[in-house]
Image: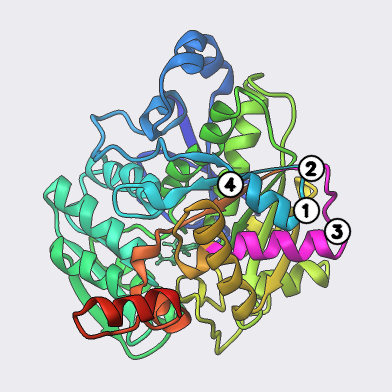
């Protein structure tokens, strides 16, 4: 398949064989550009309409020629959430639960493509900085591919389940005395200097895997497009990737419209929201981001430029929520719909509620909230926000008292 890399800022082109993350001329972010006419000609529409969703179902739209490094990612459920819709006050609400991926987050979609690309390019080691989920996914796909992975984590700020995954799957785990933004700056430098393949979302190939969330949403809605997609934003790759997926389906004539991309951050870490409110083209980095949602504790999102473009061109918006609001949404998802998510994921639902309450989202819209990571990723947060279990003597009287009082 024919494709190349294009700078979103200056339009410079780069060949697909180059090991490159940003534009050599202006340092702008890169996009993967395909020959859509060729794809259209060769696309098996019957298969597209009938095969079950998974990342590699859409391989005609992915930049990998080899047999991919895969552990069956994607194909996550799209739940129709009527009780939650009623509470929030929207007509039709769906939750795309990305916590149901093999490692419990959407990062698997990116890593199956990213690690496959590393192998295709002949790279022998992969690396990333991470607030946790990227590192878990990198470790697992590195293990599956049989190559070493190196992960840099902000010391003391990563949820337990995620560290456990990175360690058990054999990554070299390095704690940085700094925040995620510091770790990302460091790993980018390391990968420029050493033959190590960088697999953060600044790598445009990784985002190609994540765009399959858009394909699956359309697929699971019977080839209908929702009015709006709401999702958490941290390093800002996912909102960009999903927007690209929706655009590609329009380009290919599979759909005829796109949803409004709506990004949610927390009040303690919301550079994209501030830029959106100021109608700015770029963010002002935040030096000390802080939130209970450690996955999106990010002050200098690498994909900010792409995300702001995606929000603007899709007619979407950006909003922030408090930690209390996201914890309430996490409980609503869990207790009204049986969907267990980590704190960052719940910002999508908290943000939707806030925007509906404010009259900024119409109650008539069909909305998809993306929940990006599984509840079990961050057990410590769960314990800290839920009522403590009671301990009783092992007899019926004590049990009755505990149950009925
Ligand atoms: C669970 C979870 N949700 C949301 C995000 C934000 O995604 P993005 O960085 O692509 O904006 C991340 C990571 O950043 C994450 O781990
Ligand atoms: N939440 C992310 C932060 C890194 O984002 P990436 O998309 O650039 O890898 C994580 O899980 O580490």
Residue at horizontal 56 percent and vertical 73 percent from the top: 327
Estimate the spatial distance between the alpha carbons at disc 3 and disc 4, rounded to whole Å. 38 Å
Along the polypeptide, which appears first: circle 3 or circle 4?
4
Find disc 3 in the rendering and name its residue: 360
Query: Within the magenta stretch, is there residue 353?
Result: yes
Residue 282, quarter of the rendered image: bottom right
| Among numbered discs 2 and 4, the one appearing first in the sequence | 4
Residue 15 in view = yes
- Give the SS element for disc 1: loop
Q: Which mark is residue 12?
A: 4
As helix, strand or loop, the secondary structure at mark 3 comes to: loop
Alpha carbon distance from label 2 to label 1: 10 Å
Q: Position of residue 399 (x, y in %)?
A: 30, 77
Query: Label 2's element?
Result: loop
Tell me if 81 is positioned left or right of 192 in this view: right
Name the front one of labels 1 and 4: 1
Bounds of the magenta span? Answer: 346-366
The residue nearer to you, when weighing 153 against 358, is: 358
Question: Which circle's residue, 1 or 4, is located before the other in the chain?
Answer: 4
Q: CA distance from mark 1 to mark 4?
A: 46 Å
Residue, x 52% and y 55% (percent of image)?
A: 371
Instruction: Give whichever of 8, 314 is nearer the camera.
Output: 314
Lower sequence index among marks 2 and 1: 1
Tell us which disc is closer to us: 3 or 4.
Answer: 3
Circle on res. 89 = 1
Give the alpha-carbon distance from disc 3 to disc 1, as whole Å.
12 Å
Task: Mark 2 vs mark 1: give the one in front.
Answer: 1
Reading the image, the residue beneath label 2 is 365
């Amino acid at each position: 398949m024919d494709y190349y890399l294009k700078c979103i800022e200056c339009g410079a082109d780069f060949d697909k064989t180059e090991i490159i993350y940003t534009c050599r001329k202006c340092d702008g972010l890169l996009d993967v550009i395909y020959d859509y006419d060729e794809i259209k000609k060769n696309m098996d529409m019957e298969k597209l309409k009938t095969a079950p969703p998974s990342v590699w179902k859409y391989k005609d739209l992915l930049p990998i020629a080899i047999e991919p490094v895969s552990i069956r990612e994607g194909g996550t459920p799209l739940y129709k959430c009527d009780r939650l819709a009623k509470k929030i006050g929207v007509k039709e609400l769906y939750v795309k639960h990305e916590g149901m991926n093999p490692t419990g987050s959407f990062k698997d979609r990116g890593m199956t493509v990213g690690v496959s690309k590393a192998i295709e390019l002949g790279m022998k080691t992969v690396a990333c900085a991470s607030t946790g989920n990227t590192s878990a996914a990198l470790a697992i796909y590195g293990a599956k591919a049989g190559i070493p992975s190196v992960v840099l984590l902000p010391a003391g700020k990563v949820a337990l389940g995620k560290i456990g995954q990175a360690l058990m799957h054999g990554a070299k785990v390095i704690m940085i005395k700094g925040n995620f933004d510091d770790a990302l700056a460091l790993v980018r430098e390391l990968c420029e200097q050493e033959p190590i393949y960088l697999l953060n979302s600044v790598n445009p190939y990784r985002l190609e895997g994540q765009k399959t969330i858009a394909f699956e949403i359309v697929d699971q809605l019977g080839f209908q497009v929702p009015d709006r997609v709401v999702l958490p934003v941290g390093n800002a790759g996912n909102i960009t990737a999903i927007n690209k997926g929706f655009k590609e389906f329009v380009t290919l004539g599979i759909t005829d419209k796109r949803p409004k991309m709506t990004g949610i951050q927390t009040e303690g870490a919301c550079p994209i929201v501030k830029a959106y409110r100021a109608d700015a083209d770029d963010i002002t980095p935040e030096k000390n981001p802080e939130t209970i949602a450690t996955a999106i504790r990010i002050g200098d999102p690498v994909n900010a430029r792409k995300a702001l473009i995606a929000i603007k061109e899709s007619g979407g918006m950006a909003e922030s929520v408090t930690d209390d609001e996201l914890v309430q949404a996490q409980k609503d998802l869990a207790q009204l719909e049986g969907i267990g998510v980590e704190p960052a994921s719940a910002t999508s639902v908290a943000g939707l509620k806030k925007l509906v309450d404010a009259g900024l989202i119409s109650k008539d819209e069909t909305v998809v909230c993306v929940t990006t990571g599984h509840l079990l990723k961050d057990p410590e947060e769960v314990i800290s926000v839920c009522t403590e279990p009671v301990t009783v003597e092992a007899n019926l009287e004590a049990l009755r008292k505990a149950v009925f009082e």
